Image: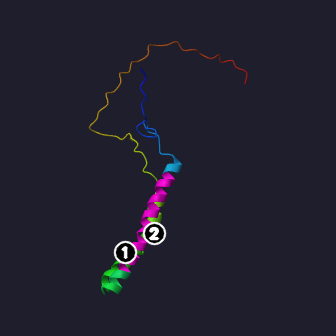
Amino acid sequence: MRRHHSPVSASPVLITGAAVSPAAEFAARRRRYSLIMSLRIPCLVLAGVLALGFGWSIAAAVIVVLSVPLPWVAVLIANDGPPRKAEKVARYRPDRVVEARETRALGTGVVIDVPTDRAA
């Protein structure tokens, strides 16, 4: 009897430490940029409703001032890449003593002399 297993998800499972593909990273950054920029229009509409509908001009001015840096923030966040992987750096730690290796002296060796009557 054969059993047919249906795949749980259509996307492959990431089992390695490989980085996200550049296309997927770009799509995620584009979605973040679009989301942040789409917040600016509702802020301006809300400021108009508060100022014209309720007469709350100070609250409307605060919302407009807060919405001014949104394009700049959106560009900064969208241009930000993924965080770098932490690398373990070998640093000197005085509490950690490495045992010195034993050195042994070589026995007396044979010295090979070069003949002195060389032609220069």
Q: Residue at point 52% right, 49% down?
A: 22
Q: Give the vertical position of 46 relative to 114 (above or below).
A: below
Q: Secondary structure at mark 2?
A: helix
* Residue lying at 38% horizontally and 21% vertically, measured from the top left: 103
**Residue drawn at 51 percent across, 54 percent down:** 26
Residue 53, quarter of picture: bottom left
Closest to the observer, 19 or 89: 19
Please tell me which residue lies in front, 4 or 88: 4
The one nearer the camera, 30 or 93, is: 30
Please tell me how crowded label 2 is: few (under 14), some (14-19), or many (20+) other residues with Cα within 10 Å.
few
Can residue 20 be seen by looking at this rendering?
Answer: yes
Rendered position, 9 above or below 74: above
The answer to whether 22 is drawn above or below residue 39 in the figure is: above
Front-most of 106 and 49?
Answer: 49
Residue 69 shows in the view: no
Q: Quadrant of residue 90?
A: top left
User: Residue 28 placed where, x, y %?
Assistant: 46, 54
Q: Residue 75 location, x and y as percent?
A: 47, 64
Q: Please identify the residue farthest to the right as the structure is shown.
A: 119
Q: Quadrant of the C terminus?
A: top right
**Whole-percent x and y of residue 98?**
32, 30
For label 1, the residue is: 66
* Region in magenta: 25-47
Q: Can you name the residue that lies furthest to the front here?
A: 1
Q: Splitting the image into 4 quarters, where does residue 55 fall?
A: bottom left
Identify the mark nearer the N-term, 2 or 1.
1
The three-letter code of the residue at mark 1 reads Leu
Q: Please give the residue where the numbered disc 2 appears in the rendered image.
A: 72
- Disc 1 on helix, strand or loop? helix
Q: Residues within 10 Å of mark 1 (few under 14, many from 20)?
A: few
Quadrant containing the N terminus in the rendered view: top left
